[in-house]
Amino acid sequence: MKKNMGIQDTVLQNIKEDNIIIGRNAVLEALKGGRSIEKILIAKGTEGSIKKIEALAREKKVQLHYEGRSILDRIVKDTNHQGVIAYTAAYEYAQTKDVFGLAEERGEDPFVIICDGIEDPHNLGAIIRSAECSGAHGVIIGSRRSAGLTEVAVKASAGAIEYLPCVKVVNIARTIDELKKKGLWIAACDMDGELYSEMDMKGPIALVIGSEGKGISRLVKEKCDFTVSIPLLGNINSLNASNAAAVLMYEVRRQRNEGFR
């Protein structure tokens, strides 16, 4: 019989492949130097100079997670972590201009995937993989409550990250406003939308994929121009986020190749 995995084991399993920076001075200097940091783990009850790290991390919109000291001990083993560990991106983020540059280079209308709160790095990597395969020009993720380009996500992308810009933004809703100004239509993927195959998605478009549990946030959904849904004919009432994203991406590709209808 398989042993049930505890909370600490789950945390370790999810982060064991990430790049890490250990210790207060190292983490503080990484923040000051503009290093791309996904999240910072702080041992509960840690005081003193850790306050500087917390303040700078909040200023730079870096996620802070508070864990028991034993979690940090097990991650770094014999290294003195001083109550703090930072996880860096395994790959450099692109900028929005790189997404539009790729679309222009191909002579195509922009096709963008927006991940609103995708927390599982395996799902993020799978979405990046499907996006590259379906001919999208970029993936946009948020800086808070979202998976980033960790080693796990990069591996799950199966090399797609080498060819597809991935942009990290502070505010998804504000980014949607900017995309609209550039002529993109914004389509939300949600259960209460119109059947995806009945909607015209062949022009400049961004598809918004919500988190695995909560879906698209209210503010982001209000910014979308329309909502599309995928029919579910079985007993399960939802698809995995990366699977739903793949279905919609290939519908966009089909419409671009064959025309709407």
Image: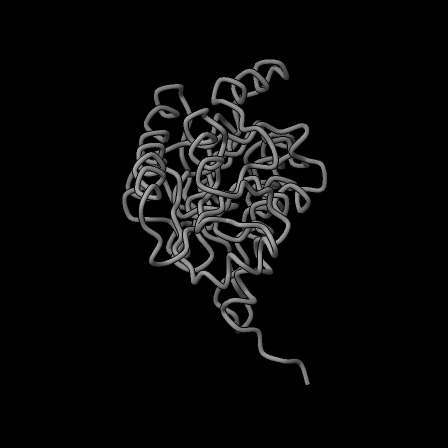
Question: Would you place residue 126 above or below residue 162 in this image?
Answer: below
Q: Is residue 50 visible?
A: yes
Q: Is residue 200 visible?
A: no
Question: Would you place residue 128 above or below residue 121 in this image?
Answer: above
Identify the residue at image location x=31%, y=30%.
174
Identify the residue at image location x=64%, y=17%.
106
Image quarter of the C terminus: top right
Q: Locate residue 7, reporting x and y percent.
A: 49, 69
Image quarter of the N terminus: bottom right
Identify the residue at image location x=66%, y=47%.
156
| Total labels drawn | 0
Q: Locate residue 29, reporting x and y percent.
A: 45, 30
Report the coloring of the rendering: one colour
In the image, is 106 to the left or to the right of 118? right
Question: Would you place residue 255 above or below residue 102 in this image?
Answer: below
Query: Quadrant of residue 54 in the image?
Result: top left
In the image, is 55 to the left or to the right of 200? left
Q: Residue 133 or 261: which is nearer the viewer?
A: 133
Identify the residue at image location x=50%, y=49%.
81
Q: Residue 222 or 67: which is nearer the viewer?
A: 67
Q: Locate residue 53, reporting x and y percent.
A: 36, 39
Q: Locate residue 190, reporting x and y percent.
A: 41, 52
Q: Residue 33 or 140: which is nearer the viewer?
A: 33
In the image, is 49 to the left or to the right of 29? left
Question: Would you place residue 85 above or below residue 108 in this image?
Answer: below
User: Residue furthest toward the bottom?
Assistant: 1
